[in-house]
Amino acid sequence: MVLFAKGGWYCLEEQAELGYEVLGVDWTVEPKYVRNILKNKNITVQGNLDPCALYAPKEELKKMVQKMLEDFGSDRYIVNLGHGIYPDGPIESVHTFVETVHNFKV
């Protein structure tokens, strides 16, 4: 089961005690904060690129995605946007997002 509480960074510790296997986080949460709260817990993190990043130039978007991947690490992590894609989100940017994730090397 997955729990995603947009803006719920302040109660992440409580969320971790609810029995969910995956906690989704939005882009307002620092990866180090999330990892610190969830250390030694059997919980996967999902998130958290700001959906507005899809409007950035291609190279800047790549850098943002790579930083997110580096900051979260590869242990128990599902790459995602922090709150979905806006209806007018550029499709080419979605391709860049996915391609950057697929090509990322730890």
Image (tube, helix red, strand yellow):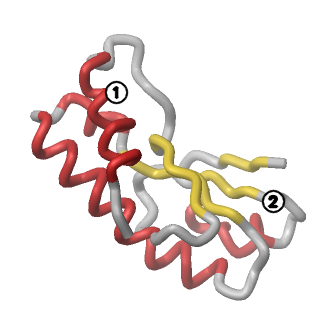
Coordinates of residue 35 in the picture (x, y in percent): 55, 77
Separation of marks 2 and 1 at Cα, in angstroms: 26 Å
Q: Is residue 77 above or below residue 75?
A: above
Residue displayed at 58% across by 61% down:
77
Q: Quadrant of residue 69?
A: bottom left
Residue displayed at 15% across by 35% down:
56
Front residue of 86/46: it is 46
Q: Which mark is residue 17?
A: none
Q: Which mark is residue 94?
A: 1
For this orientation, the residue located farthest to the top is 88
Q: Is residue 46 above or below residue 36?
A: above
Compared across the picture, whether 8 is left or right of 49 comes to right
Compared across the picture, whether 11 is left or right of 27 comes to right
Coordinates of residue 46 in the picture (x, y in percent): 59, 53
Q: Are marks 2 and 1 in contact (CB under 8 Å)?
A: no
Please tell me how crowded label 2 is: few (under 14), some (14-19), or many (20+) other residues with Cα within 10 Å. some
For the residues carrying marks 2 and 1, which lies nearer the camera in this image? 1
Q: Name the residue type under label 1.
A: Val
Q: Is residue 36 above or below residue 70?
A: below
Coordinates of residue 98 in the picture (x, y in percent): 38, 36
The C terminus: image quadrant? bottom left
Front residue of 14/32: it is 32
Q: Name the residue type under label 2.
A: Glu
Q: Secondary structure at mark 2?
A: loop
Q: Which residue is mark 2?
A: 21
Front residue of 30/71: it is 71
Residue displayed at 41% across by 56% down:
28
Q: Secondary structure at mark 1?
A: helix
Residue displayed at 64% across by 66% down:
76
For this orientation, the residue located farthest to the right is 19
Please tell me how crowded label 1 is: few (under 14), some (14-19), or many (20+) other residues with Cα within 10 Å. some
